[in-house]
Amino acid sequence: MRDALVARGYSSKTIKAYISQTERFFAGLQGTEASINDAAVQKYALALLAKGLSHAYVNQAISALKFYFHHVLKQPKSSAYVRPKKESKLPDVLSLDEVMRLLKVVKNPKSIRLFCT
């Protein structure tokens, strides 16, 4: 798998991540090799989500396994994998009290004008 990733110009961090994801998938497999199919990958992805892992992590696992099955095992491409929707996280926003405390510690009044414009 490493050779296939290097040949396609993947970065060293992607190579490390994909190999780790593939190793974790096979380490967690229960049963025989006959059960390695799209359904097994989908079950694995659902198990990762159930553990509370991020959607980005699960998407990376799916991408690594798709790469492995297509480029290493030479299986036909499959579009059967359902990827989790991208998480939308709200930004951290300061409360009014926190903003007031920040402005009160400013020594130079000119600096406050910079914040207020």
Image (cartoon, grey):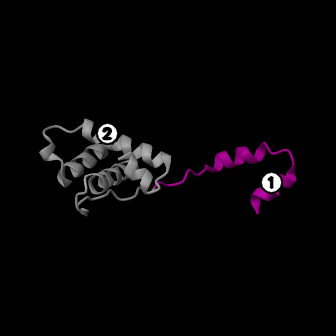
SS at badge 1: helix
Residue at 43% across / 43% down in the picture?
Answer: 16
Question: Residue 37, percent across and down?
Answer: 18, 52
The tally of labels here is: 2
Is 18 displayed left or right of 103 in the figure? left
Q: Which quadrant of the rendered structure holds the C terminus?
A: bottom right
Mark 2, Cα crowd under 10 Å, few <14 / some 14-19 / many 20+, is few
Is 59 displayed left or right of 107 in the figure? left
Residue at 33% across / 54% down in the picture?
Answer: 67
Residue at 50% across / 55% down in the picture?
Answer: 90
SS at badge 2: helix
Specify the segment rendered in magenta: 89-117
What is the distance, in whole Å, between disc 2 and disc 1 at their CAs?
A: 54 Å
| Residue situated in front as seen by the camera: 101 or 56 | 56
Residue at 26% across / 53% down in the picture?
Answer: 69
The numbered dot on residue 50 is: none
Name the kind of residue labelled 2 in the image. Glu
Of circles 2 and 1, which is in front?
2
Q: Is residue 26 visible in the rendered structure shown here? A: yes
Q: Is residue 96 magenta?
A: yes
- Contact? badges 2 and 1 (CB < 8 Å): no
Name the kind of residue labelled 1 in the image. Ile
Q: Is residue 43 magenta?
A: no
Rendering quarter of residue 114:
bottom right
Q: Residue at label 2?
A: 23
Q: Residue at label 1?
A: 112
Mark 1, Cα crowd under 10 Å, few <14 / some 14-19 / many 20+, is some
Task: Choose the circle earlier in sequence order: 2 or 1.
Answer: 2
